[in-house]
Image: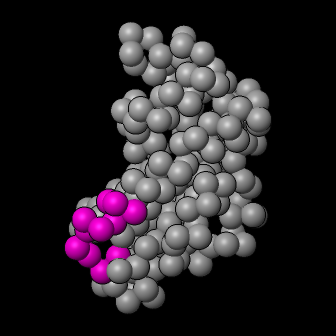
């Protein structure tokens, strides 16, 4: 079974590519969604986050996502500390999820594929790239984040140049190039369709 990572910065269109793959019948692990779910349900994560940032990170026994976001995106030190807590749990969850799949290939979508170390568990990596202005516009349309907040998050993620060095395939998602033919071409090269 091939393990293929899908990565790219915030607003690049990783989720759109992942959705296309799911529509084609491929299993896709959404590491961001799973990390959020595990942060709510995993006792070890909860205990370590509470020890690090205090009890007020959880209100009525529910993670205050906005408070956590403010903590991690205001400090590189906080981001690294939170990632050190959550990433190992996500890696283990992905490994368990993979054993339950019956497919020629599984895909893992992650904005922080490189930072988390998950790229080392992948057989191939697909990078989704998008011009920065378009990324900012997309994120502003779908979220309450300001342009400055989006740029701060972009700076916390690896740049596209660094990601491109590890990528086996690049999908250009600039609204000029069609996505489905690019995805189809990659799947053909991987010999899984």
Q: Is residue 11 visible?
A: no
Q: Name the image quarter holding the C terminus.
A: bottom left
Q: In the rendered structure, which segment of residues is drawn in magenta?
A: 95-105
Position in image of residue 15 (x %, y %): 43, 52
Identify whether 91 is placed above or below 39: below
Position in image of residue 29 (x %, y %): 37, 57
Identify whether 185 is placed above or below 85: below
Side of 89 relative to 103 (left or right): right
Q: Is 44 colored magenta in this rendering?
A: no
Scheme of colours in the image:
one colour
Identify whether 98 is placed above or below 70: below
Q: Name the image quarter holding the N terminus.
A: bottom left
Residue in view at x 71 percent, y 32 percent? 78
Residue in view at x 50 percent, y 23 percent? 65
Q: Is residue 116 visible?
A: yes
Position in image of residue 24 (x %, y %): 26, 68
Position in image of residue 88 (x %, y %): 53, 51
Residue in view at x 54 percent, y 11 percent? 56
Q: Nearer the viewer, residue 185 or 43?
A: 43
Marks counted in the figure total 0
Residue in view at x 76 percent, y 36 percent? 76
Side of 72 relative to 103 (left or right): right
Side of 73 relative to 64 (left or right): right
Q: Nearer the viewer, residue 32 or 140?
A: 32
Q: Nearer the viewer, residue 40 or 131?
A: 40
Q: Can you tell which quarter of the image residue 189 is in?
A: bottom left
Q: Nearer the viewer, residue 157 or 99?
A: 99
């Amino acid at each position: 079974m091939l393990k293929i990572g899908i990565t790219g910065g915030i607003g690049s269109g990783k989720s759109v590519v992942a959705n296309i793959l799911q529509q084609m019948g491929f299993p896709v692990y959404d590491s961001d969604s799973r990390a959020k779910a595990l942060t709510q349900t995993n006792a070890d994560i909860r205990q370590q986050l509470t020890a690090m940032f205090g009890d007020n990170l959880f209100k009525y026994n529910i993670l205050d996502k906005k408070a956590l976001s403010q903590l991690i995106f205001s400090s590189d030190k906080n981001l690294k500390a939170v990632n050190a807590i959550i990433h190992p749990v996500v890696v283990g969850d992905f490994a368990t999820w993979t054993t339950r799949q019956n497919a020629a290939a599984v895909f893992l979508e992650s904005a922080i594929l490189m930072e988390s170390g998950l790229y080392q568990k992948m057989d191939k990596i697909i990078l989704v790239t998008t011009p920065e202005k378009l990324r900012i516009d997309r994120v502003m349309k779908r979220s309450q984040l300001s342009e400055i907040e989006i740029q701060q998050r972009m700076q916390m993620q690896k740049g596209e140049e660094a990601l491109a060095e590890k990528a086996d395939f690049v999908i250009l998602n600039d609204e000029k190039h069609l996505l489905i033919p690019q995805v189809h071409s990659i799947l053909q090269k991987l010999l899984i369709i």
